[in-house]
Image (tube, rainbow, N blue to C red):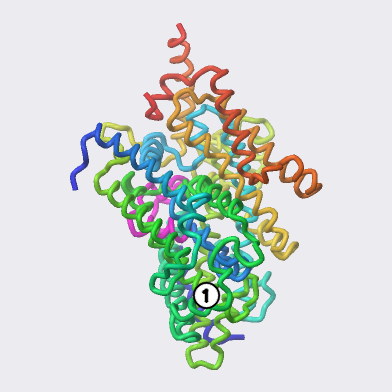
Amino acid sequence: MSPAPVERRSVWSRVALVWFCSSTAALVWPVYPWLGNRVEPRVAGLPWSLVYVLLVIAANFLVLLALYGRRIVDARELGEDDDVRKPTTKGTHERRAGAEAGEADQERDRA
Amino acid sequence: MRPLALTVVVLYLFATVIMGVWAGRRGRGSAGDYVAAERSFGPVVMYFVVGATIFSAYALLGTPQRVVARGSDAFYVLAYGAVGLVPLFFFGARVRRIGAREGFFTQAELVAARFESPAVSVMMGLASVVAFVPYLVIQLKGAGLVMEAVTGWSSVYGAAVVYLVVLVYVITGGVRGVGWTNVMQGIAMLVVVWVLGLWIPTALFGSVSAMFDRVVAQQPEFLTLPGPEGRTPISRYSSEILMSILGLSMWPHVFMKCFTARSARLVQQSVVAYPTFLFFLVPLVLLGYVAVLAGGPADDTVLLWLVDRLAGSAWHPLLFAFVVFAILAASMSTGDALLHAGGSIWVRDVVLPLERWRWAKAAIWGARRLRILPRPERPEDPLREDEAGQTRAIRLMIVLLAVIAWVMLDAVGGTSVVDLLLLAYAIPIQFLPLVLLGLYWPRASRRGAEVGLGAGLVTLLSVFVLQQVDPQAAARLNPLQLELGMIGLLVNGVAMVVGSLLSRPPSSLVLRRFELR
């Protein structure tokens, strides 16, 4: 699947956030006692209280799969131009130098 | 003594050592490789690392136990798992990218660099290790329980034998050892638990559906909240789910796996695939209901007790060996990740930022003189520049952590650890404002982060101590019965926002490095 354009991705990314907040709400008070906390109807013998939670998991799985396939949520890889530091301890050392440079930068910003 | 189970245990322990050591030999042996496997984990290893690390002995032994004790309250593990890793889907790619660009291997390294604060690194590192110890004791307890059932030894010695094996492959193999053994352990757990979860209800009741018919007829209160004797009010169930959702992706050993993935996409892929691991809890729930009908014990021996219901069957020894295998796999796959992350965090997040201090320098100098740490080519080299020294220090810390957890298991038998677990689960949630505001709010500043985290951790500790010393006073001060972690999170979040707004904003260079500009 090809990725969606950037502006559409941003909108869908927000929609996805709303979806996951709603699915969280579906699992707790007051929605769960209202819709999920009962024995009937039973599905394949399992009580509805369990099936309901499994359905939320399945729905979230499908939504995540779609978000992943369409590259809707930020999935950018480190670009070829970026400086990928090898996993050495020097990374931390260089960061400190970067932080010092940052302070100088900040001084300039204030000026 | 159970000969077949013992044979399986011995073969399994040998196999994990061989696999762990073999995996470790694939790397370069540097500190970065030891901690993050040179960011090389592919889809299979990432899938099992994330899944098997989260599914601990606590999940395996605790889920059926929870069904017996509290009925459908046990579904909470499934419920929080449905959303728990989703935050990682949203920020995981960015974390992986920044980590690769900046050379980060731990959660605190990333956060401390964003806020330019070694103090944040040290606080996070110390808090993480405090959270890990009781969690580790629970894993040791699971291993000990199994070894006691198989060999008849005391569980303390049984746990020691299992964790000696874990130490061998974690020390020699690093995160590669952890990753590849997690693959084997994950497959074992998934297969065994599904086989048992379908087999035992069918053997005893004819089918899963028939089993639930009997639960509905005889003990329907176990199928809905508030459960038997109203033990789980919906408010408590809801708050536990919310807290777990907020905290799951903040556990340092889970978060760190973003740095081990081969690509940003792979981090997201692991989150997408996670529910397949989550479904592994369903058979454990089924087994819990078997125990409800059969009058099983409401403690962590319930799984082994259930298998013994089939005593006399020709398949019983094999089933028992299967269960033992799965429990050991669950215990070891979480325990190894905790040990490895704990050692790495202690050295990289606590020792390295404090290295400038005179006493820390003296301690490192002394350790080198005594050959506890290797001597670097240039004696004046700091530990930060000494890869071999760091790797050795991490290994030593891993051993120390294992010994502390084992001594705690011996001293308290694992019972008082439940109280400590309350504190342990509340700690990772305190990292949430740092991570989310740090990654998405450009105004979040160093002072805000230090004040927020400090206030959150102090609140957490004070409330915890008060709850232990004077529970009535703690209840009066907390009329809404908020969870420990939630109280800390509220104080932490407010302090961080106010502190950030009142202090100097971060420099534009830092914002660029963290993709905020």
Where B157 falls versus B111 (above or below)? below
Query: How far from the left and from the top, in percent, is residue B137?
Result: 64, 60
Q: Residue at x 63, y 42 (%)?
A: B126
Q: Amino acid at mark 1?
A: Val
Label 1's element? helix
Q: Locate residue B5, reporting x and y percent.
A: 53, 82
Q: Which sits in the foreground, A12 or B323?
A: A12
Any magenta on residue B227?
Answer: no
Identify the residue at horizontal 59%, vertical 65% (top origin): B163
Specify the subunit that label 1 lies on. B
The spot of residue B122 in percent (x, y) is 60, 36
| Residue at x 60% of width, y 69% of height | B65
Q: Looking at this view, name the residue that lies furthest to the left.
A: A2
| Location of residue B61 with respect to B467 vertically, above or below | below
**Looking at the rendering, which quadrant does residue B278 occupy?**
bottom left
Magenta-tinted stretch: B24-53
